[in-house]
Amino acid sequence: MSKGNEGSKGKGSGRRDGKSAGASKNNDRRNEKSFDNKGKSPSRSNDSNERPNTRGGKNQVVGTSRSGKAVTKKEYIDRKKSESFTKRKTDKAGTRLNKYIANSGLCSRRDADIYIQAGSVSVNGKPVIEMGYQVMPGDEVRFDDRPIQPTKKEYFILNKPKGFNSPRKGEGSTRTVLDLMENASPNRLHFVGRLGRASLGIMLFTSDLELANKLNNPKQKLRKIYQVALDRSFKHEDLMKLRNGILLDREEVEIKEINYVENGKNNEVGIEIHSGKDNIVQRVFESVGYEIKVLDRVVLGGLTKKDLPRGHYRKLTDQEVINLKMIQ
C-alpha cells in the first residue's frame, strides 16, 4: 500500500515533474544562446560590438576620448608618436619667430610680435604674420627687408672711468661707454645701470636685450651700492635723516643702508639704494643740502669691480649670469 502510494505518487509526481521538466527544457532552450552554422553566437557577436576589447593586442581599449569614444591601444600609440614628432620638430629643429628676432638684438619678443603682425618680417621671401611661426635651420629671415640672424648672448662688466657718457636711445654723444666696449664683441651691446659723464664705477653690458630691458626698468629693484665724496663733512644728524627715509616727488625713497666709509674721511659716505631712477643718488644728498664731488658705483646687482682696473672690462662667469637672471 505504501509502495502503491509511493508509486502513484511517483507517477503523479513524474507526470507533473515531466511536464515541468519539459517546460524547463523548453525554457532552457529558449535561454540558451543559439549558434549559426559557423559555430558563432549572434548574441555574443552583438556583445562584442557593444563591449570594448580588454584582452590585449592592438585593439585593446585603453581609454576614452573626450567625446566618449573608445580609444584602442594602436590609436593611442599612433597619437603619441605624432605628438612626439611635433614636439621634437618644435623643440629641437625650430625657433619661434619672435624669439629669433629678439635673439638678433633688434628688439624684445613683445615688440617683435608687433612687427610680425605689421608685416615687417619675411621668411624665405614670404611675409609672415602668423604668431608662433617656427623658423627652421636654413631659413632666411628678413626684418624691413634686411637679413637678420641670432647673435650669441654675451655679458660683460666695465669699471667705467670719468669722461665717458652713457647715451640714451637716439642720443648722439662723443666719447661714450660704448666706445670703451667696441672691441669686446662684434654683437650689439646694451648697457645696464646708466652713469653720467663724471661718474665712475661698475656697468653691465650685454647682447641679451630682454635682460637689459628687465634690469633697466625703473620698477626693478636692482641692488646698487655707491661710495660718494661730498663737498663738505657729512653731519651725523643728516645721516640719521636719510636713514629714516625721504620723500622725492612725493614718493618715498627707500635707502637700504647708509654710513660713513670705513677708514675714510668725514665727507666720504657709502649708500645702498635699489631705485632705478636717474640721478637718484645726487638728488638724495641734495635733499639735505650736499653736493656730490665724486660718485663711484661699487656694486651692481651682486656684481663687484674687485680686481678690475678702471677703464677695463671682463666677461661674466656662468654663475654670475645665472644670478642676474634670477633677480626678480
Image (cartoon, rainbow, N blue to C red):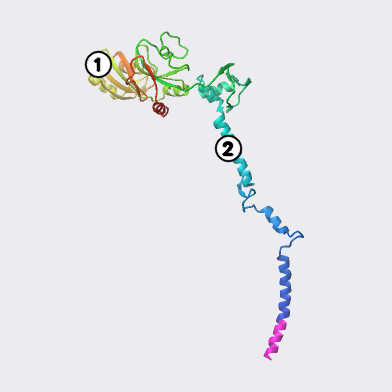
Q: Say whether residue 256 is magenta.
A: no
Q: In the shown orientation, is residue 80 left or right of residue 222?
A: right
Residue receiving disc 2: 84
In terms of depth relative to the viewer, which is nearer, 91 or 202?
91
Majority secondary structure in the magenta region = helix
Where are the magenta residues, as a range?
A: 1-12
**Where, by quadrant of the figure, is residue 312 drawn?**
top left
Instruction: For residue 285, say whether it is visible.
Output: yes
Q: Say whether residue 7 is magenta.
A: yes
User: Residue 3: x percent and y percent?
Assistant: 68, 89
Which residue is at 46% across, 14% downward?
169
Secondary structure state at the residue bearing disc 2: helix
| Residue sitting at the far right | 37
Q: Which mark is residue 267?
A: 1
Q: Give, as a three-letter code, the residue at label 1.
A: Asn
**Where, by quadrant of the figure, is residue 202 drawn?**
top left
